[in-house]
Amino acid sequence: MAKVLVSVDGPVRSVTLNRPDKRNALDDDVLQGLIEAFPADPGQNERVAVLRANGPVFCSGMDLTQRKETLGQPTSIETMLRAVENFPLPVVAVVQGHAIAGGNELALHCDFVVASSEAKFGMSLAQIGLAPTWFLAKKLMEVAGPVATREVLLLGDPLPSTRMYEYGIIARVAAPDELEQEAQKIIQRLAANAPLSLRIMKKTLVRQMAFWHDQAYDDINAEVSRVSGSDDAREGIEARLARRTANFTGK
C-alpha cells in the first residue's frame, strides 16, 4: 500500500501520510511521495491542499532505523519541505497527533496548522545528537521567533499544541472530536476564494520569507553535517531506538 495517499476532489487536493504502523516516520519512500504530492503546477481548478495523517501520530520525524545507516549524509527532507512550502496554493495541515522533528517541520512548512488539543510539537534533535540545517532552523525563526525557537531547539522537549498556539506558531487548536470541523472552516473559506488571488498571494508570501537565503550559511551546514556524523549522533539514535538514556561524550 502507498505510504502517501493523494486525491483531488473539486478544489481540494488531499494528501495523507499512510504509515501509521511506523508513526508516519519519514523514510525515503515517504519523502519522495510527498515531493510528488505537491507539484509545482497543480490543476487549474484546485484551490487548496490539505495534509493529514492516518493513525494516532501525525509524524514522528525521520525514520531513525534508516537514518542511522546514513549519518552525516544529506537526505531529501529539504527538497520535500521546499515542495510543500512552494506549492502554489495554500496548504492546511490537520494535525491529529504528535508532530516531532521532521514532522514538526512538515507541519510548519504548511500555511495553516489546525491541531488537536492533545497533539504535541517538538524538535528533539539535541536529545539524540543531531542538529537542524540552516533551512530547517530558518523556518522555525520565521514562524516562531527567537524566544520560542530557543525553547523548541535547545531544550528539545515537545510543546503542547496550546503552547504553540499561544506563541502564534499554529493557526487553530480544537478538541479531538472537533478537529475536522475546525479545519473545514479554513479549508472551505480558502476553496471559495479567488484562485488567481490565492496564487499570487502565496507566491508573494514565500518570496518575502526567503530573504534569509542571501546570508552565507555553508559553514553552518558543514558543521551540522559533522555533528550528524558524530559518535554522539550514532549513540543518540541507538539510545532512542532502544528507549534508553544516551551517554554523550562530545565526540
Image (tube, grey):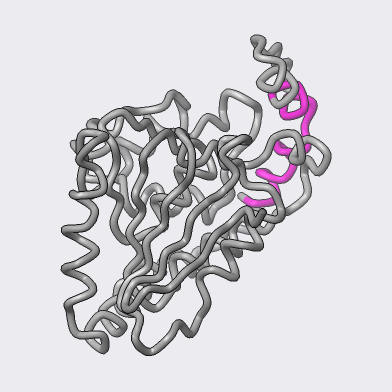
State the quadrant of the C terminus: top right
Residue 187 relative to residue 78: left or right: left
Q: Along the line of sight, which residue is nearer the eye, 190 or 242?
A: 190
Whether residue 234 appears in magenta in the rendering, the answer is yes
Q: Is residue 146 above or below residue 234?
A: below
Q: Position of residue 125 (x, y in %)?
A: 57, 32
Q: Residue at x 78, y 49 (%)?
A: 73
Residue 4 relative to residue 43: left or right: right
Q: Residue at x 65, y 53 (%)?
A: 219
Which of the 4 quarters of the picture holds residue 207?
A: bottom left
Q: Position of residue 215 (x, y in %)?
A: 50, 64
Q: Which residues are magenta?
A: 221-236
Q: Is residue 157 above or below residue 75?
A: above
Whether residue 134 appears in magenta in the rendering, the answer is no
Which of the 4 quarters of the picture holds residue 131?
A: top right
Residue 250 visible in this rendered orientation of the protein: yes
State the quadrant of the N terminus: bottom right
Q: Position of residue 9 (x, y in %)?
A: 37, 73
Q: Position of residue 187 (x, y in %)?
A: 24, 63
